[in-house]
Amino acid sequence: MSKEPETEPYEQLFLRFSAKVEKIIIRAVIFVIILLVCVQALLQNAYIRKHFTRVEPLEGQPYIVPEHPLRERS
């Protein structure tokens, strides 16, 4: 006597669904971690880092102190 999918109890359907969703979430997390490691490795290259980041061209430029630091701005 085999049960058809329509007659399976709700718990069995939920367990099957949650197992599929769990696999998808685990694969997504692993993909994001691998992507993070790859991007961090790419950022070690100065040429690539120059094109990926907006702050890189500003590195090493001196900070200009305002003329009157104690005066309040109006």
Image (tube, rainbow, N blue to C red):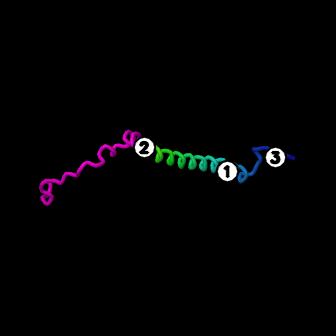
Question: Of tags 3 and 2, which is closer to the observer?
Answer: 2
> Alpha-carbon neighbours of circle 2 within 10 Å: few (<14), some, or many (≥20)?
few
- Please give the residue where the numbered disc 2 appears in the rendered image: 45
User: Residue 36: percent from the left, percent from the top?
Assistant: 50, 48
Between 68 and 39, which is closer to the camera in this rendering?
39
- Please give the residue where the numbered disc 3 appears in the rendered image: 3
Q: Indicate the secondary structure of the residue bearing disc 2.
A: loop
Which residue is at 14% across, 60% downward? 70
Is 6 left, or right, of 27 in this rendering? right
> Alpha-carbon neighbours of circle 3 within 10 Å: few (<14), some, or many (≥20)?
few
Question: Of tags 3 and 1, which is closer to the observer?
Answer: 1
Is 61 left, or right, of 41 in this rendering? left
CA gap between label 3 and label 2 equals: 59 Å
Q: Main secondary structure of the magenta part?
A: loop
Q: Quadrant of residue 47?
A: top left
Which residue is at 46% across, 43% downward? 42
Q: Amino acid at mark 1?
A: Ala
User: Residue 41: percent from the left, percent from the top?
Assistant: 48, 46
Between 8 and 55, which is closer to the camera in this rendering?
55
Q: Which residues are magenta?
A: 45-74
